[in-house]
Every structure is written in C-alpha cells, then in structure tokens.
Image (spheres, grey):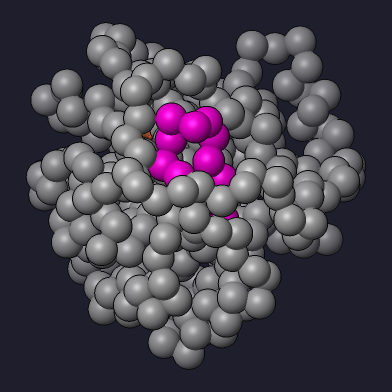
Amino acid sequence: MSFEGAFVTALVPDGATRLTVVGVPSVAQRKPGWLKQRAPLAGPNYRDIKQVMRGRSLHTVCEEAGCPNISECWEDREATFLIGGEDCTRRCGFCQIATGRPKAYDRDEPRRVAETVADMGLHFAVVTGVARDDLEDKAAWLYAETCREIHSRLPHCGVELLIDDFQGDPKLLRLVLDAAPQVLAHNLETVRRLFRHVRPAFDYDRSLQVLDRARRWSDCATKSNLMLGLGESEDEVREAMRDLRAVGCQILTIGQYLQPTHKHLALQRYVEPDEFVRYARYGREIGFDHVESGPLVRSSYRAGRQAQNAGAWLRPAAANA
Ligand code: SF4
C-alpha cells in the first residue's frame, strides 16, 4: 500500500527494523510553531460521528493514527479505513506499520467496512491498506469489493482507493478500476533521487505507470502524495510534480514528514510554510486540479473536497445546506 508515513506512524506500535539514511544527521526534533496541532472544531457532524463510534467496535485510521485533521474531515463526513490486516509485506523507511507475515485473507472485511461507512453516514470514504505481496491478487479484490459494497449501501458516497502498485500487474489494477472508485490514489511520497532509500520495494517509474494507466483506463480522478523533509531540494520536488502531471495526475497532496522513532528515516528539515505555498502555486500553474500543500496536510485530508475540485464527485446537496 502506499499511504503517507506521517499519517500512519501512530497506527501500529513500532516493532520492525527500519531503513535509515546513513551519515546524515537528523534535525532536532523540537517542532516549529507551525506544526502545533489546531484545537478540534467539534462541530455537529463530528459530534454525531463520535457518538456513533462510541460503544461500537468500529475503527478508522483517523482515530487510531491520531490524525491532526480528524475534526475537519469528520465534520465533512469523511473518514479513512485500513484494510488487508495490520502487517505489511514491504518496509518503507518512514512507515510505522509493522513488517511481517500477514494473516489470511478476510473476505468478510469489505462488508464490515461498508457497514461502518453506512453507520457513520459518510459522504466520502478513503480505503487504503498494507501491501499484500504474499497474496496472488495482492489484495486487489479486497479494494474492489470494499468499493462495491460501499456504493451498494450508499450510492452517493464517494470512494477513494489508495493502493500500492500491485507489483505493476495491469490485470490487478484493472480489477480495482472496474469497481469504479471516484478517485484512484497511489502515492509517490518522495523525489526520484531518494526513492530507493525511502521505498526500497517500490520503483519510481512503476509508480508513475500505475497513475498513468489509471488515468487512461478509467474515468476516475488520479491522485498522489509527496512527503517533504527527507533531504529533497525544491527543484527536485518541482520535478516530481512535473512527472506526476506528465501522467495526468489531477490531485496532489504535499505535507511534512515527521520521524516516528530514531529507527526511521532521519528528518532533514522542517519545511517552512512559505515553501508549501510555493508548491501549491506551482501545482496550479502546471495544471493540477487540486493541490493541498501545507505542513499538517496528510494524503487523506479532506479527500472529498479534493475529489470535488477535480470534478470526480459531487457532494450530496443536503450536505451543502
Ligand atoms: S507499503 Fe507497507 S511499509 Fe510502505 S507505506 Fe505502505 S504500509 Fe507502510
């Protein structure tokens, strides 16, 4: 799978050896003021969903990862779910999901996720998961079936499937696209020069190919994410943005990497808010439909609004009232 590490970091207790960039010191971990979390909004929708979740065994990544944006997303009736288990078959240097031998395929999971989405009365759901290279279908069916189950219960609920690269298998990508998600996301995460260090089991060009195929083979919007602070230069970030646009990627999120533990990739710098603003401006100039760029931005941050701006989904009219 491929969702950005900073978002995932609190999800699973640390337990695996991680790649580190050797010979480069990490910056001091004292966070600058702009990374201080905002006070939650706690509006009526957020309170309603909180109430639904209380006393039930329903779980979202939003809560379990302690995402700083939860109140904004839930207020928009948007949430993120992790499927495919808690152990990943890959090992990205920024991610705190445990690497291990995953459990057997749980074919009932799509139904349970969709019921949760319906119980929460969501307008937009992001579904992501761990990489399952151990499975013949790399968990592609799980994504597809979860999307179908959500749409069958809530036809107006938008779905973003945030997938890994399925090792570049075109059949598996087609299987997922046939489920008709509103958004197909695959995260690049970092620039070409750092890619092998950061995502050793992925390949920069193969990731671009996933987005390229999704764009050409379906009507859904395509989306990706970049994580900053790993040693990339501003020119390299712009180059990655152009590479994404060259394969037709429409939505881009850009946020700050935060090192979860000393075993993870060293944090090289805190990116200043002005630099994020420059990327947002540049992204619009080169043709992205939506760029969400800021220190606290995570891939799933207000995903429905991103989809709407890309023309891939329309928020139900009652939700705008
Ligand atoms: S592929 Fe696995 S290790 Fe890499 S970001 Fe996804 S969950 Fe984390």
The range drawn in magenta is 255-266
Q: Where is residue 31 in the image (x, y as percent from the top left)?
A: 71, 49
* Above or below: residue 114 compared with residue 240: above
Q: Where is residue 80 in the image (x, y as percent from the top left)?
A: 56, 38
Identify which residue is drawn at 48% across, 90% down.
285
Q: Is 259 included in the stretch rendered in magenta?
A: yes
| Image quarter for ligand 1 | top left
Residue nearer the viewer, 17 or 131: 17
- Specify whether residue 203 is in view: yes
* Residue 55 placement: quadrant: top right
Q: Is 57 included in the stretch rendered in magenta?
A: no
Q: Where is residue 72 in the image (x, y as percent from the top left)?
A: 75, 50
Say left or right for 76 vs 132: right
Main secondary structure found in the magenta portion: loop
Say left or right for 142 vs 216: right
Residue nearer the viewer, 44 or 21: 21
Identify which residue is drawn at 79% across, 28% down.
50
Residue nearer the viewer, 24 or 121: 24
Say left or right for 185 vs 167: right
* Residue 117 placement: quadrant: top right
